[in-house]
Image (spheres, helix red, strand yellow):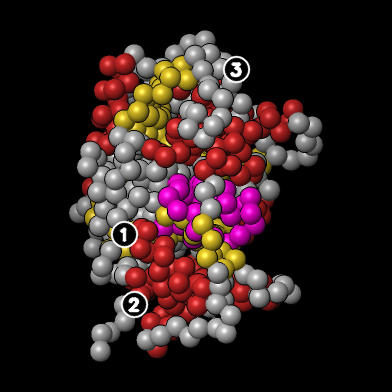
Amino acid sequence: MTTPPQLATFIKAYDVRGLVGTQLTEPVVEALGAAFADEMAAERAAAGGSTGDLELAVGHDMRDSSPGFAAAFARGAQARGASVLMLGLCSTDQTYFASGHLGLPAAMFTASHNPATYNGIKFCRPGAQGISVDTGLGAIRDRAQAYLDAGSIPATDAPGTLEHRDTLAAYAAYLRELVDLSTVRPLRVVVDAGNGMGGLTVPAVLGTAAGLPALPLEIIPLYFELDGTFPNHEANPLEPANLVDLQKAVVAHGADLGLAFDGDADRCFVVDELGQPVTPSAVAAIVALREIERVRAAGETGEIVVLHNLITSRIVPETITGAGARAVRTKVGHSLIKDVMHETGAIFGGEHSAHYYFRDFWGADNGMLAAMHLIAQFGQYEGPLSALAAAFTPYTASGEINSTVDDVPAAYTRIVEAFSARGTLDELDGLTFSGGDRDDWWWFTVRPSNTEPLLRLNAEARRPETMVAIRDEVLGLIRR
């Protein structure tokens, strides 16, 4: 008898991410579908609701394994009595739209920016509310493990139904309602979809593929063909090597800006007219200002809250507080931040990894919506994007630097010993030290990846030479 896989080895803090064929198989996914249906039914029953009409939405990206996994997940959920709305090919934020718009729990099959050998699942409750290991994902894992250990999924007397629905046009129309791009100046935009789901959503939202009116945007496409083998480059714009083609194309076409989406198109990265990256922190600061101004103009009174994770540039909280709102610092992670969005009533949240969260999008992250806000702001600006971005990039940052580390506690001990007398320690998420004075401050964060065997370093300082010295010292301690 084959030993069932141990789900705890690849179900992480806020999603499922595993190797196809060894960790993620159709029987495993079918068990997770059954467990998700059970957990959603249990939560509904605990809240006093009926469990007889439970419905789930399931979407998937363009990876070769995704359609089969989505079908297996649906079989498991149906066996436990849930009816399933199959969304088909879609971006992760399109699945969040379906969850929010239709009020359904949802599962999205994607491994985001990971290589083609991986796949995964992102779960959400109705209204696109996140599910982390501490708020339901752990229970789903344990339920699924029990089914795998037992070797079968008992079917209910009334299995659920299956329906297919395309939500792309409704998704595109909703985003157009949130951000009006019809009056921006004409812009030439190169978009690198990385053979990911942006190849489906960009023509619908920024073009006319969904039947919407044309915008004053000339879209120059790179790698819009959906291909889960990623034949051109990995769909991970956080890695500089994966931006090279976009940077060259922006300069070659004389474009005003470039956009790069990751594999499931929920993150968007920006380059300026010179082909230089615009930091996600600068984008977060710009969008935060727009959202603060928008809700004030709409007549909202009282405290306005905007989130930023602990790795964003100091310019982000400075921009938020400078505009009269309250900046709330969070851990890294989409499910965790969605929880804080709902707890605080925040209107917006930004992460260093180019995840951007919107109250008007049910508190979920949407890279396309962030790109639209940036285009709207830039489309009313007379100068080049490089000048606009420079105003929101006054400090020097290292970017995220990853190191494979076998003994994380030992690395932590070395760092604490070296910096405990020189800075203030914060353990909100990993280790964060900050020090210096008003004219020469610095900070750095070292935290473990939730999905890979890595330690991630981010550092920033007021002065470039200070950042370099801090960065190099900490890297030496990590990699010793």
Image quadrant containing the N terminus: bottom left
Left or right? Give the position of 140 relative to 300.
Answer: left
In the image as oriented, which residue stretches furthest toward the left? 480
The residue singled out by tag 3 in the image is: 183
In the image, residue 342 lies in the stretch drawn in magenta: no
In the image, residue 106 lies in the stretch drawn in magenta: yes
Kind of residue at disc 2: Gln
Left or right? Give the position of 20 relative to 460.
Answer: left
Image quadrant containing the C terminus: bottom left
Kind of residue at disc 1: Ser
- N-terminal of the two: label 1 or label 2? 2
Q: Look at the image and give the residue range highlighted in magenta.
A: 85-109
**Circle 3 — which element?**
loop
Q: Distance between the residues labelled 2 and 3?
A: 54 Å
Residue 259: name its quadrant: top left
Q: Specify whether residue 212 is in view.
A: yes
| Numbered disc in front, either 2 or 3 | 3
The residue singled out by tag 1 in the image is: 65
Q: Do the residues labelled 2 and 3 touch (CB within 8 Å)?
A: no
